[in-house]
Amino acid sequence: MSDLTDLYQEIILDHNKRPRNFGKIDQPTHFAEGHNPLCGDELSIFLDVQNDKIDDVSFDGQGCAISKASASLMTERLKGKTVEEAREVISEVRKLLIGPEESEPDLETLGDIAALEGVKKFAVRVKCATLAWHALEAALEGKSTTSTE
Amino acid sequence: MSNIMPQPKTDPIIPFPLNVETVRRDFPILDIHVGEKPLIYLDNAASTQKPQVVIDAIQRYYMLQNANIHRGVHYLSQKATDAYEEARRKTARFINAESEDEVVFVRGTTEAINLVATSWGSRYILEGDEIIISHLEHHANIVPWQMLCERVGAHLKVIPINDDGDLDLDAYEELLSDQTRIVAIGHVSNAIGTVNPIKTMIKTAHSRGIPVLIDGAQSAPHFPIDVQDLDCDFFIASAHKFYGPTGIGFLYGKAHQLDAMPPYQGGGDMIQTVTLEKSTYKKAPGRFEAGTPNIAGAIAMGAAIDYLEHIGRANIVTYEQELITYAKERLQKVEGLSLIGEPAEQAGAVSFALDSVHPHDIGTILDKKGIAVRAGHHCAQPLMKRLGVPATARASFAFYNTKEEIDSLSVALEKIRDLFV
Ligand SMILES: Cc1ncc(COP(=O)(O)O)c(C=O)c1O
């Protein structure tokens, strides 16, 4: 059962139960919907970016514990960061979730997000964890929808 | 027969009534472990496991009978052709078709529905015509009709369901119009197990001269089927859902329907004569079987049919009804669990939600306990939307499942709820 406890760490269960920054932002400067056709999950990401700084970020939608926790952890981590810093986080998350075996993501940059590491052992669930991040990237690039496929 | 081959178990003790321990021994895969845990396979609506006799039939074919059919004059070609056509007779008997010429071998349910939508559709569906399906359908019985509608400018009409997951039959009668050209409905819902009253629905459509196609993918595994009694125009199923191999299934069509339909694909085996200017086609079913078919698959489907008849179709109904009744009772005792869809008559599958726990989390944790269920939209997104859920967890049953397995599932679900809620 240790794989399972790696996957569903306390932090993840907690973010699933009490998602942070959940709901829409009134007048987002950036917005994107992420869609996982495999399971039908849909998450929306809202950003309020002023002078290249993420003043506010939130997410909305429905998903499994992994996708919700991932989105919640993301918003917590990005609030107040510059877009540049956000891109660094994205790049470390990529290493964490889909990087080759030997990649060593920077744990300091990741913070609590590192709790998602256990997902790697569950190939079919990796897309749940990456959904919010795909949507974030799409939002930053000014696209309004994206899909994990 | 040489003795290098595993011989089919020709004469095991007839389990009457069905003895689940005996039956389980016919399915080698049921002995495997997932990690440390013995496999509990509750994803039968997606695909059933295969008894040894079906596995043997495939091996026997490739070891002793393999050649192309309907072509050679040599020994093996004759043997393969005989075995393939014997499988057609078995399939006709399986659904009580009047003649084996009414049985077309296809890749599965999806291909069969596409075949009818394309071939029958090109002959009979014109701009402004209407096709009726229901809100319960699998994508395989939605998308081919949508494609046809788009092609010719016809309209898709949908029989609504009530909150229990039963079809609204009054609405059905109102939908039938002078423009309706065909009714295409599932017999049993793969997502929530609703058994539709197809016999009366067929009668109603026929009273207005409208033909009916039945998607039997989820009924053929569970009930005896009698197409003459049902009087349906088409009946379709996939072998892999009734203990046969993947890549093979059948399309039953009434002779007059099949005979009036243009070919689906062109090629070898479906023609009478070919000149460079024009070809003439075989009669049904050959007309619809262009190219080298899945010969081993058809023969093994025949073996699955023999096996089901050997177990006794009535025994299967009795045992499975007891199992699903037990499953519904036991699952409802799990705190926070709600059944999704409570149709008047239910077979095969039970869908449920567990408080706010997402079905995928349920699926992942159950998998670690060796329990295979399906979590997702079950290729029925319009139905999920109607029921107000993005996805469900679904346990679906075969006659080799036991009450103890249902208990294990229920206990596991109780633990999952403790973890998440
Ligand atoms: C009701 C129903 N129709 C159609 C299909 C499609 O069957 P196949 O994938 O074997 O073509 C399925 C199986 O998933 C089903 O359950």
Image (cartoon, rainbow, N blue to C red):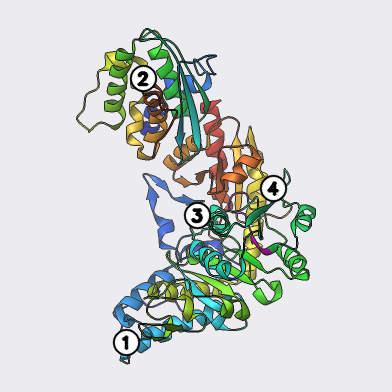
Q: CA distance from mark 3 to mark 1?
A: 35 Å
Q: Helix or strand or loop: what does disc 2 sit on?
A: helix
Disc 4 marks which residue? B165
Whether label 1 touches label 4, CB < 8 Å? no
Three-letter residue code for mark 3: Ala
Crowding near the residue tagged with mark 4, few <14, some 14–19, many ≥20 C-alpha atoms within 10 Å: many
Point out the tag, 3 or 1, that comes first from the N-terminus: 3
Magenta residue check for A33: no
Whether label 2 touches label 1, CB < 8 Å? no
- Residue ID at (52%, 81%): B284
Q: Is label 3 on the same chain as label 1?
A: yes
On the image, the x and y values in percent for residue B168 come to 75, 51
Disc 1 marks which residue? B76
Chain designation of label 2? A
Q: Which residues are magenta?
A: B181-192
Relative height, residue B256 to residue B327 (above, below): below
Chain designation of label 3? B
